[in-house]
Image (cartoon, rainbow, N blue to C red):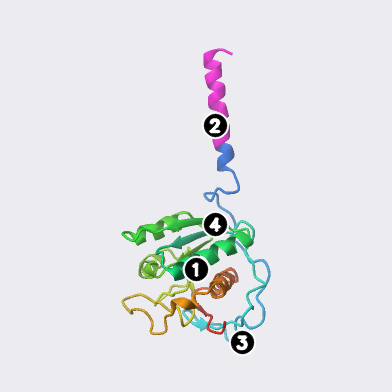
């Protein structure tokens, strides 16, 4: 093969390779329909006679979220900051849930010197859901999420003081950090971030988002 033909063939092969990678199932740049839940909520998750208002707190019956699962390939960004024990427990729970549910999970570790940049990087990935773990992210999330109302965000182990409709939180008395200079709750207890509670937090929160119960706080004090 002459050099010019050989070069042309090499370029064609390279172009085909790039096209193949761009059309792969893990390419988040490609648009797709909004994800829908697999399964349904059980009795006691919400009161059917009194739908929660925006920013309301619900106390679902333990296990009432077990029947709801994300669709395979659900795109989730785990946004995290901090290396304290509660944050590590939440991160582990999110990763375990993602593996069990075949979620397409990517992680953004936000730099403490520019937490807003970390949040924006997560949103710019265009996931189905951003899951936030770490109290340091609460105040920056309050600023950013109000300007990105199309992005669903789930906060586990804390909550925003004034969430918009796209921000859902899962909290309990031992967590209950709300930022905005309010300080740590008097009931805060790092020991309450058990594997059981953190696992329940991501599952209950994801179930709420997937079934359209967003902009609320899911309260898990009833877990023992």
Q: Which residue is mark 4?
A: 105
Q: Residue at x 68, y 69 (%)?
A: 39
**Vertically, is 90 above or below 75?**
below
Nearer the observer, disc 2 or disc 4?
4
- Residue 93 in percent (x, y) is at 54, 66
The N terminus, quarter of image: top right
Identify the magenta region: 1-18
* 1 and 4 marks in contact (CB < 8 Å): no
The C terminus, quarter of image: bottom right
Nearer the observer, disc 1 or disc 4?
1
Instruction: Based on the picture, tell me whether residue 165 belongs to the magenta stretch.
Output: no
First of labels 2, 4 by sequence position: 2
Instruction: Based on the picture, tell me whether residue 14 belongs to the magenta stretch.
Output: yes
Of residues 150 and 182, the one nearer the viewer is 182
Q: Which residue is mark 3?
A: 49
Q: Residue at x 54, y 73 (%)?
A: 201
């Amino acid at each position: 093969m002459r050099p010019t033909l050989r070069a042309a063939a090499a370029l064609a092969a390279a172009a085909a390779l790039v096209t193949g990678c761009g059309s792969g199932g893990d390419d988040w740049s490609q648009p797709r329909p909004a994800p829908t839940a697999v399964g349904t909520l059980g009795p006691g998750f919400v009161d059917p006679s009194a739908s929660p208002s925006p920013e309301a707190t619900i106390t679902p019956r333990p296990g009432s979220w077990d029947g709801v699962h994300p669709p395979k390939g659900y795109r989730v960004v785990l946004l995290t900051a901090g290396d304290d024990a509660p944050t590590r427990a939440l991160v582990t729970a999110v990763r375990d849930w993602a593996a069990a549910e075949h979620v397409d999970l990517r992680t953004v570790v936000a730099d403490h010197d520019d937490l807003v940049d970390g949040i924006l990087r997560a949103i710019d990935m265009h996931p189905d859901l951003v899951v936030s773990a770490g109290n340091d992210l609460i105040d920056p999330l309050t600023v950013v999420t109000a300007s990105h109302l199309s992005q669903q965000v789930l906060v586990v182990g804390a909550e925003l003081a004034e969430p918009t409709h796209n921000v859902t939180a899962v909290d309990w008395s031992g967590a209950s950090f709300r930022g905005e200079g309010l300080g740590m709750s008097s009931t805060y207890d790092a020991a309450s971030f058990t594997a059981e509670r953190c696992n329940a937090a991501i599952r209950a929160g994801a179930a709420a988002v997937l079934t359209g119960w967003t902009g609320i706080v899911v309260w898990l004090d009833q877990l023992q």
